[in-house]
């Protein structure tokens, strides 16, 4: 089984909300609901005051379904609507969902919601309709800062991919050439070590998504 995930380099994320907007557009997410929320963490104090430089720091944290290895939302389902798919992602079978919202209550990251019109629960699907065809999730494809990367955890995050920079593709290339171009995280990443890699709080669900944050204090407990 694959273990697909998204890794976000928080030092590259500028909080532009492109991931959230792209997700809402391609997935037709209702007004007032989100599959991706971008939180501002901080400003927080970060050491002693140094001249004109403020002693505060902040960063932006995109949050969505973490497609966990041991998801709490799947454990509480009465109809098996929430399930682990063959590609390791967590999906919802709407034909089985009865809108009881047990999964919403068990979910630790507050990015599941009840679609009031359809009376079914919805959340990030990790764009399986795209990744099954070799494309990137929409939030990764539309990240202007190239802060988001998609890949299989079994292959290591250095092999996660994002769109290649079109300005480096040369002249005379087609839209499809640029659209299909990829670059690995190792191609553009600044040095990092294991202490710079983080997950959202683990309550026994083992979240798969990763965040790289260098030189700043990670505010969430592992």
Image (tube, helix red, strand yellow):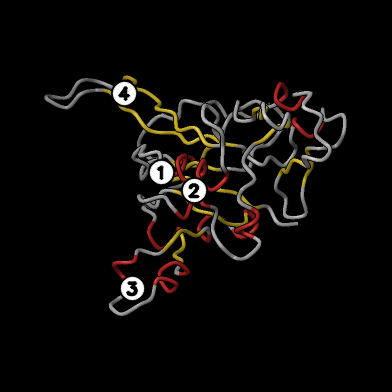
Is residue 126 shown above or below 70? below
Kind of element beneath mark 1:
helix
Residue 16, by quadrant, is: top left
Residue 169 placed where, x, y %? 33, 73
Q: Which residue is mark 3?
A: 169
Q: Which residue is mark 1?
A: 18
Q: Which residue is mark 2?
A: 139
Residue at position x 37%, y 59% in the image: 188
Residue 126 in the figure: left or right of residue 76: left
The tag on residue 63 is none
Distance of mark 1 from mark 2, alpha carbons? 7 Å
Residue 64, by quadrant, is: top right
Residue 73, by quadrant, is: top right
Distance of mark 1 from mark 3, alpha carbons? 23 Å
Label 1 CA crowd tier, 10 Å (few <14, some 14–19, many 20+): some
Looking at the image, is mark 2 or mark 3 earlier in the sequence? Answer: 2
- Quadrant in the picture for the N terminus: bottom right
State the count of labels. Answer: 4
């Amino acid at each position: 089984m694959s273990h697909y995930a998204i890794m976000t380099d928080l030092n590259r994320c500028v909080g532009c909300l492109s991931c959230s907007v792209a997700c809402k557009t391609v997935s037709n997410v209702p007004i007032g609901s989100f599959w991706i929320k971008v939180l501002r963490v901080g400003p927080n104090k970060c050491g002693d005051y140094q001249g004109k430089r403020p002693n505060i720091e902040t960063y932006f944290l995109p949050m969505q379904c973490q497609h966990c290895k041991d998801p709490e939302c799947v454990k509480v389902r009465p109809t098996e609507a929430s399930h682990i798919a063959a590609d390791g992602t967590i999906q919802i079978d709407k034909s089985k969902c009865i809108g009881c919202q047990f999964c919403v209550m068990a979910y630790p990251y507050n990015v599941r919601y009840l679609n009031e019109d359809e009376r079914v629960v919805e959340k990030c699907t990790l764009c399986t309709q795209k990744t099954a065809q070799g494309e990137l999730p929409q939030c990764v494809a539309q990240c202007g800062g190239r802060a988001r990367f998609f890949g299989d955890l079994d292959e290591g995050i250095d092999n996660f991919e994002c769109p290649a920079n079109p300005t480096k593709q040369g002249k005379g290339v087609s839209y499809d050439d640029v659209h299909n171009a990829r670059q690995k995280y190792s191609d553009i990443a600044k040095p990092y070590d294991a202490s710079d890699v983080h997950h959202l709080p683990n309550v026994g669900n083992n979240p798969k998504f990763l965040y790289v944050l260098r030189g700043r204090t990670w505010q969430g407990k592992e």
